[in-house]
């Protein structure tokens, strides 16, 4: 018998999080007659029992179209290995006993956790300790294998496409090479889809290590056939055939992913050296994570939130919602995490892009 659930958002934010929160609260309150407790800043809210309050329908009014998350989030820390200060020293501790105690004090029958791979892995482990967890996947990177799409992705693609449209006009006016660096970690989905939508001349993605001479050839070919400018999309995780990823900061106990960035500058410099054409870079960065979600992402997020409430009602704990074709379904979190969904270098989408003349920098074979 469910009476009260908690809801939290963890990991990097993503357009559509608020739409999920709204859907969960509406389904919980209007359909199931449950109370919903807001857990702020991922699992930190439960560790420190910070500002844990009942969410009312008023609290979620007007948030469907708003970016970010009203619950706050963090992509640092893990309650199983939390860095805390003790007697003036930083030590790593397991703070899950505090979480279990607070869940008990609050009387939470289940928790809906909205997060990416890292957050869902923690959710799975809390499930092993007896917490009734239901997951909702999120990431602009669209790199979770268990779901055909994650909300936030189409918004990020739309933002990158608009940026490309703008870069096109300035590239053409100045007869320059304009490079747009986009996010996506080790998956090239944002670069690939925005590159196709924005009519890019070159797309560089992590799944196809690139030969910079091949890319320079493309720019020169365009030059001699009268197109004196080129527009390129470079995924932050793109990698040269004979080089490495561009890493800004190493992973740590607190921040479990390496921070990528800078490949756009490396490519622009190399192209300018090889072609003599002035090259400039725009790094889209967190603009891809902010702002209003597309209609598609609002609908997907709403469907995910409603289904998460249904999973709680059906006691399908340890599961997360997912999209399969056009249907919302569920999958055990255990099976869903740790498997990246990456672009198939020989798949249909890349092939279509190549048919359009887009250069991926595949080395000459
Ligand atoms: O996973 C989402 C994402 O935006 C990646 O595309 C990017 O590499 C990373 O998060 C950036 O994280 P942060 O917000 O810590 O800079």
Image (spheres, rainbow, N blue to C red):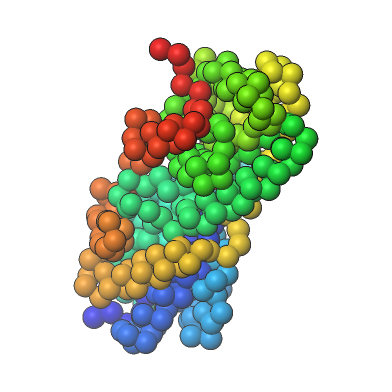
Q: Total number of numbered labels?
A: 0
The correct choice, above or below, for 289 with respect to 63 in the image is above
> Who's the residue at 37% across and 61% down the image?
136
At x 55% / y 41%, what residue is drawn? 199
Image location (x, y in percent) of residue 243: 54, 18
Q: Position of residue 34 (x, y in %)?
A: 35, 83
Q: Position of residue 117 (x, y in %)?
A: 40, 48
User: In the displayed structure, does residue 125 sit left or right of residue 77?
Assistant: left
Q: Residue at x 38, y 30 (%)?
A: 345
The residue furthest right is 174
Q: Examine the rendered structure and indicate whether residue 179 appears above or below residue 24.
A: above
Q: Nearer the viewer, residue 135 or 327?
A: 327
Which image quadrant: the C terminus?
top left
Position of the N terminus, as image quadrant, is bottom left
Describe residue 163's horizontal placement relative to residue 59 as left or right: right
Residue at figure coordinates x 30%, y 50% from the top left: 146
Does the image show residue 241? Answer: yes
Nearer to the camera, 30 or 240 = 240
Position of 253 relative to 220 (above/below): below
- Place residue 289 in its image quadrant: bottom right
């Amino acid at each position: 018998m469910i009476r009260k659930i908690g809801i939290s958002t963890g990991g990097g934010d993503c357009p559509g999080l608020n739409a999920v929160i709204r859907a969960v609260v509406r389904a919980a309150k209007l359909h199931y007659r449950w109370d919903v407790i807001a857990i702020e800043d991922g699992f930190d809210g439960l560790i420190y029992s910070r500002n844990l309050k009942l969410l009312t329908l008023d609290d979620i009014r007007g948030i469907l179209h708003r970016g970010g998350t009203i619950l706050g989030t963090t992509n640092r820390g893990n309650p199983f290995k939390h860095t805390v200060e003790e007697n003036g020293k930083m030590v790593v501790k397991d703070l899950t006993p505090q979480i279990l105690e607070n869940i008990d004090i609050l009387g939470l029958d289940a928790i809906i956790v909205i997060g990416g791979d890292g957050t869902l892995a923690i959710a799975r482990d809390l499930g092993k300790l007896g917490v009734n967890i239901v997951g909702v996947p999120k990431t602009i990177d669209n790199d979770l294998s268990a779901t055909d799409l994650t909300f936030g992705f189409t918004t990020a693609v739309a933002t990158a496409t608009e940026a490309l449209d703008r870069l096109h006009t300035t590239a053409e006016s100045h007869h320059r090479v304009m490079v747009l660096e986009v996010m996506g970690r080790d998956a090239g989905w944002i670069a690939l889809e925005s590159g196709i939508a924005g009519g890019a001349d070159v797309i560089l993605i992590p799944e196809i290590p690139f030969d910079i001479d091949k890319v320079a050839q493309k720019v020169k070919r365009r030059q001699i056939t009268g197109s004196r400018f080129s527009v390129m999309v470079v995924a932050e995780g793109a990698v040269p055939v004979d080089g490495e990823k561009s890493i800004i900061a190493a992973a740590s106990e607190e921040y479990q992913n390496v921070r990528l960035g800078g490949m756009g500058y490396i490519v622009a410099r190399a192209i300018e050296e090889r072609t003599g054409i002035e090259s400039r870079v725009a790094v889209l960065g967190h603009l891809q994570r902010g702002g209003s979600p597309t209609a598609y992402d609002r609908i997907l997020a709403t469907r995910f939130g409603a289904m998460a409430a249904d999973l709680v009602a059906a006691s399908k704990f340890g599961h997360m919602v997912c999209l399969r074709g056009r249907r919302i379904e569920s999958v055990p979190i255990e099976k869903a995490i740790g498997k990246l969904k990456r672009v198939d270098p020989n798949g249909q989408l890349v092939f279509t892009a190549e048919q359009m003349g887009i250069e991926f920098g595949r080395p000459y074979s």
